[in-house]
Amino acid sequence: MQAAREMAGAVHELEDADLAILALMLLADIGVEVSAPMVREMAVEPRLRALALCWLVDHGLEPAATLYDPGDLEAFTDVLVISDALPSDARARLDLLWRHVAGPVSPVGWTQPEYQSRRARGDPIAVEAEAVGITVAGALPTGQV
C-alpha cells in the first residue's frame, strides 16, 4: 500500500507525460485493486484526468464509454497514429508520440498489425476511429478482423 501511495504521489508531481504514464503502469504492477482508489482521485484533476480515465478503462474498472464525453470540452482528444515505422520500444514510442503534445490531446500509436488486433477485440479507440474519426493523412487499414 505504501509503494502505491508513493507511486501515486509521483504521478501527481511528474510534469513529463511519458514518466506519468510509466508511473501509472507501475501502479498496475503494484496492484490494480490497491491502486484504483488513488487513480480515481487523479481522474478529478484536469491535468491527470485523461491518463487516469484511460488507466481505469484499461483495467476494466470503468466502461470504455467513460472516455467519450462530447459535452466535456475540457476532455482530451485521441490522435491515433498508425504506422509500421513507430519504434517497437515502448519508451521510445511514447517519447515520439508525446514529445510535442499541447493541450488536451492524447496521442495513441499503433502499428498496422496492432491496429488490426485492437479492432478485432473491439478496442474503443479503434471503433471510434472507424465510426467518427477524421483521417488527416493516409487511410485506416482495412482487411479481415
Image: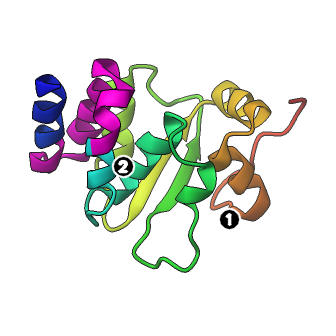
Query: What amino acid is at disc 2?
Result: Leu
- Spot occupied by residue 107 in the image (x, y as percentages of width and height): 45, 50
Image side of residue 3 versus residue 120, left or right: left
Numbered-mark total: 2
Q: Residue at x 59, y 29 (%)?
A: 84
Q: Residue at x 26, y 63 (%)?
A: 45
Q: Is residue 103 above or below residue 3?
A: below
Q: Residue 29: say if magenta.
A: yes
Toward which corner of the image does residue 131 lie, by quadrant?
bottom right
Toward which corner of the image does residue 1 lie, by quadrant?
top left
Query: What amino acid is at disc 1?
Result: Ile
- Spot occupied by residue 27 in the image (x, y as percentages of width and height): 28, 28
- Spot occupied by residue 65 in the image (x, y as percentages of width and height): 62, 57
Of labels 1 and 2, earlier in sequence is 2
For label 1, the residue is 134
User: Magenta segment range?
Assistant: 11-37
